[in-house]
Image (cartoon, coloured by chain):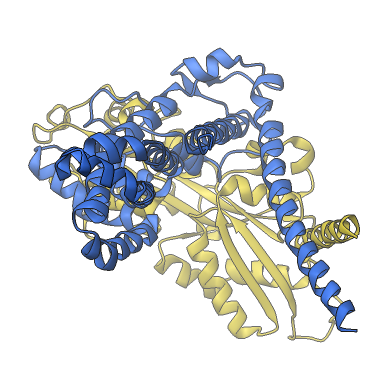
Chain colours: A blue, B yellow
């Protein structure tokens, strides 16, 4: 009897877990297939070329089923790249610095206080960041740089950099902590100072993990729509400087999707942009996998 | 075993989805007077939503057996959902023919529930109270870029607008700018009229446009008269002010009893007063129904 119930338990959980796993794979594939199905309309139904979509800055899709508009998404692609790249440039030094601080320099304080703080940081919803950006950062930028409009690529990057800072920090610090004690001891044994140990031994050893963290931060930055939309001052133009307003892939999708006509050229172009975002995140995940693959034993 | 369970789950999921999309039928068997019951779902235009919310609340108080849910989502979404019969009422700033195929639009019945008047607004420091239509067109198409050219201070003009698919933008472009395309590459687009209002309030030299409903009790921005005609409900009724549009609530086929009662309530005299206090115009008061 007890033997039978044991087996029941065993199989019940096994089946449950299997279903959960399969469902996740199924949903992911389904979303991908759906985006391909919807996004390909731009090319097959409305006969635009991939070159136009990726290489032209002429964004004027028709909000109806004719194919007379232009679907150049270059503005949004460049906007996304600029904002995220700048955010990464701002956030990475701080994130690296604080992960080194909380693992190497002051591990006790880091573990008890700093790490929980960073985790809380990561949990703040993006709308809060956007709102604070809008009410604090924008007036600040206006005052400091004497601008008429505070909304800018710079404002969006600053908000994003604060948002991705905790993601990078926690992954990077995990990677640094995982460097074995023997490695450090060996470095000290050879007469290295603490700083020499950190930048010649620990950081290179933890590099794959650190890069994973950075890519993860980049992925989060790419996907963020709400906070960026609030501070970038959405303008359909390529950014000329860090003070100009622009648009990103996500902000344009969020702004237009509700009003665009179903089955129209604009909706199709928006789906293609969503597909592009999906492919970009796929790329990021591939990069992370490549870096975090354990080296041969 | 695995396969069986997986199959069962898929069946379950699809059943749930079907369930979701068919819950709009409301019962019309109830023939006793005064006791309406049923479910009304509405989705669409965010410009119209505040009004429908108020109407839904007051109507539900009088008819407790009717439950009404109102979603935003945009005009396109509202039209699509009512065409698919996902919702009972599709709210839209534009006529269904502009956003749907002929096939989809042919069963939809239009109810012009109210009039929305759009007003150009400027930041307080601009001080310009009146623009000619040509000046307005030059400003929004990017030809005029400094306020000193139209009688204001020496200050750059900052355009604050709505996305190209927005109904508010379509109306403003059609009637205030005579169909001229706004300069997209020089204007800050905002997803929402509330945010637009905030941006114009906060930004020196900013000009934008919102529906009058957003300007009730608002003293933070100046409205601009076009060719000397103030954007008010009175001027809209008399036909002097041209930048207005009917707000549409579409039903798929003729409405059932509860929905009809709700539409009659919104367009009725009693709710009309409330409507005007919220900044919307009453359809029946329009002296001219075309522009």
Q: Residue at x 28, y 37 (%)?
A: A201
Q: Nearer the viewer, residue A207 or A193?
A: A193
Residue A11 against residue A28 in the figure, above or below? below
Q: Nearer the viewer, residue B199 or B238?
A: B199
State left or right for residue A92 relative to residue B204: right
- Dividing the picture into quadrants, the one containing residue B88 is bottom right
Residue A123 against residue B230 in the figure, above or below? below
State left or right for residue B16 relative to residue B180: right
State left or right for residue A293 relative to residue A268: left
Which corner quadrant holds the N terminus of chain B? bottom right
Q: Residue at x 32, y 55 (%)?
A: A129
Residue A260: percent from the left, percent from the top?
58, 39
Q: Nearer the viewer, residue A132 or B258?
A: A132
Residue B41 against residue A54 in the figure, above or below? below
Residue B238: percent from the left, percent from the top?
43, 51
Q: Nearer the viewer, residue B118 or B204?
A: B204
Q: Residue at x 27, y 54 (%)?
A: A103
Residue B66: percent from the left, percent from the top?
69, 78
Numbered disc total: 0
Residue A213: percent from the left, percent from the top?
39, 43
Q: Can you see residue A108?
A: yes
Q: Residue at x 59, y 16 (%)?
A: A50
State left or right for residue B58 relative to residue B97: left
Q: Please identify the residue farthest to the front as the structure is shown.
A: A189
- Dividing the picture into quadrants, the one containing residue B253 is bottom right
Q: Can you see residue B224?
A: no
């Amino acid at each position: 009897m007890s033997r039978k119930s044991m087996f029941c338990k065993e199989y019940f959980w096994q089946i449950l877990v299997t279903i959960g796993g399969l469902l996740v794979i199924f949903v992911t594939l389904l979303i991908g297939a759906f985006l391909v199905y919807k996004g390909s309309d731009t090319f097959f139904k409305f006969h635009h070329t991939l070159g136009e979509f990726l290489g032209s800055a002429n964004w004027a899709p028709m909000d109806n089923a004719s194919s007379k508009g232009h679907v150049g998404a270059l503005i949004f692609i460049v906007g996304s790249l600029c904002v995220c790249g700048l955010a990464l440039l701002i956030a990475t030094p701080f994130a690296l610095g604080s992960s080194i601080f909380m693992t190497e320099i002051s591990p006790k304080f880091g573990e008890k206080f700093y790490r929980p703080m960073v985790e809380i940081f990561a949990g703040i919803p993006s709308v809060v960041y956007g709102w604070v950006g809008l009410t604090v950062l924008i007036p600040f930028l206006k005052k400091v740089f004497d601008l008429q409009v505070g909304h800018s690529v710079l404002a969006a990057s600053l908000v994003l950099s604060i948002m991705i800072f905790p993601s990078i920090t926690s992954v990077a610090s995990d990677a640094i902590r995982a460097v074995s004690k023997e490695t450090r001891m060996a470095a000290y044994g050879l007469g290295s100072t603490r700083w020499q140990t950190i930048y010649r031994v620990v950081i290179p050893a933890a590099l794959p993990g650190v890069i994973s963290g950075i890519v993860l931060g980049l992925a989060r930055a790419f996907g963020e729509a709400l906070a960026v939309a609030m501070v970038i001052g959405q303008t359909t133009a390529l950014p000329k400087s860090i003070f100009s307003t622009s648009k990103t892939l996500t902000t344009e999708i969020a702004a237009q999707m509700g009003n665009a006509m179903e089955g129209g050229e604009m909706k199709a172009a928006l789906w293609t942009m969503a597909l592009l975002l999906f492919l970009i995140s796929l790329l990021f995940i591939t990069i992370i996998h490549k870096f975090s693959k354990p080296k041969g034993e | 075993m695995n396969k069986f369970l997986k199959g069962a789950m898929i069946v379950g999921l699809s059943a749930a989805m079907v369930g979701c999309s068919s819950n709009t039928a409301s019962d019309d068997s109830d023939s006793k007077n005064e006791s309406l019951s049923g479910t009304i779902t509405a989705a669409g235009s965010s410009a119209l939503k505040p009004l429908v919310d108020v109407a839904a609340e007051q109507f539900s108080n009088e008819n407790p057996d009717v439950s009404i849910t109102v979603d935003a989502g945009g005009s396109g979404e509202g039209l699509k959902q009512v065409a698919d019969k996902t919702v009972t009422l599709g709210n839209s700033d534009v006529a269904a023919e502009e956003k749907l195929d002929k096939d989809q639009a042919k069963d939809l019945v239009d109810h012009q529930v109210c009039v929305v008047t759009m007003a150009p607004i400027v930041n307080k420091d601009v001080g310009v109270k009146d623009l000619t239509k040509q000046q307005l067109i030059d400003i929004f198409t990017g030809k005029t870029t400094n306020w000193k050219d139209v009688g204001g201070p020496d200050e750059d003009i900052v355009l604050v607008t709505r996305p190209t698919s927005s109904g508010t933008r379509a109306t403003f472009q059609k009637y205030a700018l005579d169909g001229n395309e706004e300069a997209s590459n020089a204007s800050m687009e905002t997803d929402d009229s509330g945010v637009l209002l905030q941006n114009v309030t906060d930004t020196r030299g900013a000009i934008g446009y919102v529906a009058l409903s957003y300007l009730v009790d608002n003293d933070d921005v100046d409205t601009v008269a076009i060719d000397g005609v103030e954007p008010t409900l009175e001027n809209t009724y008399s036909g002097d002010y041209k930048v207005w549009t009917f707000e549409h609530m579409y039903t798929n086929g003729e409405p059932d009893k509860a929905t009809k009662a709700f539409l009659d309530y919104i367009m009725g005299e009693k709710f009309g007063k409330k409507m005007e206090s919220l900044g919307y115009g009453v359809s029946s008061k329009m002296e001219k129904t075309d522009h």
